[in-house]
Image (tube, coloured by chain):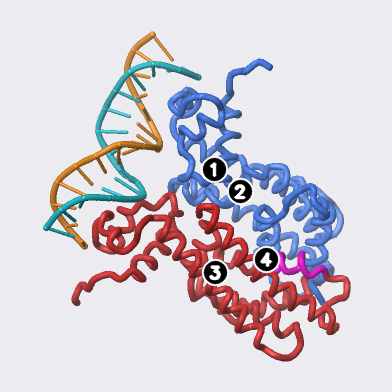
Chain colours: A blue, B red, C cyan, D orange
Amino acid sequence: MVTTRNTRADVVAAAGRLFAEKGYHGTSMRDLGRELGLLGSSLYAHVDSKQDLLVDVVEEGALLFQESAQRAMTVDGPGVERLRALIAGHIDVVLDYHDVVRTFLNEARMLDGEHRARVIAARDAYEQVFREAVTEAVAEGSLRSDVDPKTSSIFILSILNAVERWYRPGGVLGRDDLVNAIDRFVETGLC
Amino acid sequence: MVTTRNTRADVVAAAGRLFAEKGYHGTSMRDLGRELGLLGSSLYAHVDSKQDLLVDVVEEGALLFQESAQRAMTVDGPGVERLRALIAGHIDVVLDYHDVVRTFLNEARMLDGEHRARVIAARDAYEQVFREAVTEAVAEGSLRSDVDPKTSSIFILSILNAVERWYRPGGVLGRDDLVNAIDRFVETGLC
DNA sequence: CCTACCGATCGGTAGG
DNA sequence: CCTACCGATCGGTAGG
């Protein structure tokens, strides 16, 4: 096996892993170098600063969710179907980009003011897509008329984002089972 | 106003605030000293190590949730009432001990193996109380018979724990409104 | 990507 | 709780 040179993408991916596991401030550039088999100082051939790596990882996360929302909104049919597509798409992102998502959810607050503001704006826009799907589903009669789209969207996203904290692939609960369980819980609750 | 000496409890409380805001690794002992109006080195008159402070804050959080669960389980009547008491109690803890809860939820993973294991055990025991309430509520017919107590409890706790991330007191949504909205969402969903 | 290094800051200690 | 300090580690740079 040849040991090949690392690309910037390799460095960002490794940063995502370590930031997810130990946090941004709990990860040193020397830790990151070790993960890639080089010295901490060598990383500066790829990036200008440690903060740059956090920016890259977090913006990748924001982009993944944005793209997922765009795909879900192309689903035609009733609003409740678009809501289900948003849920399934979110779960896909969480499970397929576990480390990026963890860093996006837990470490974005470590960004400097300007970048943090952009991430918050992206997150708000993403939440807005959920609200619109809920609003449509209420209007078409798929959901109860007294449902508040804002609060409901927060509750749905709370369940979706927490998946990163407890779900482990390969268990008895498969991905489709998970999505179905969330759909069911969201649509009919426990009664 | 007299400037009085800090107690260990003051130090732990300030640590909770800073750990919640900037993370454990993002908070230095000098930051913490500044918060209390003294030098970083002076903190060692109160604690043996920085890790001790994290242990104190996180174990306080674990205790608060444990006590809340114990109170909720004294509620007699149907299981669904105990579930509602668990939900209301959890929200009280989250809103009354915001910083402790944030640190408990986000920084416990920074603990060393032994302490982290204890916190995980406490969290599992707490979740188990939710499962039992759901199981009883299913048995008595308050909740659907095909409800899975384990997954349902995780979803409920996902909503409850996320409150720390978005809810701000003093807004249009009061504490009782919040609890009622969660009860409604959990029991009947959006349909 | 390494060598060699920088000033700053880290958690923590001895002694008062 | 402060003074004075410790060795270790931090993010980062110059030059190759």
Marks 1/2: CA–CA distance = 8 Å
Left or right of A48 in this view: B130: right
For the residues tagged 3 and 1, is the chain the same?
A: no
Mark 1 — on which chain does it sit? A
Left or right of B187 in this view: A13: left
Marks 2/3: CA–CA distance = 23 Å
Location of mark 1 (residue):
A19
Question: In the rendered image of this protein, does residue A90 appear above or below residue A6?
Answer: below
Residue depicted at 58% across the width and 79% down the height? B68
Residue A78 is situated, as x and y percent measured from the top left of the image, at 85, 59
Residue A129 is situated, as x and y percent measured from the top left of the image, at 69, 56
Report the amino acid beneath label 3.
Answer: Ala
Say whether marks 3 and 1 touch (CB < 8 Å).
no
Mark 3 — on which chain does it sit? B
Location of mark 2 (residue):
A102
Residue D2 is situated, as x and y percent measured from the top left of the image, at 16, 57
**Residue B62: mark:** 3
- Near mark 3 (Cα within 10 A), the count class, few <14, some 14-19 or many ≥20, is many
Which one is earlier in the sequence, the residue at label 4 or at label 2? 2
Quadrant of the frame with the C terminus of chain A: bottom right
Location of mark 4 (residue):
A155
Report the amino acid beneath label 2.
Answer: Arg
Element marked by disc 2 = helix
Which one is earlier in the sequence, the residue at label 4 or at label 1? 1
Q: Nearer the viewer, residue B25 or A163?
A: B25
Which one is earlier in the sequence, the residue at label 1 or at label 2? 1
What is the magenta range?
B148-158
Element marked by disc 1 = helix
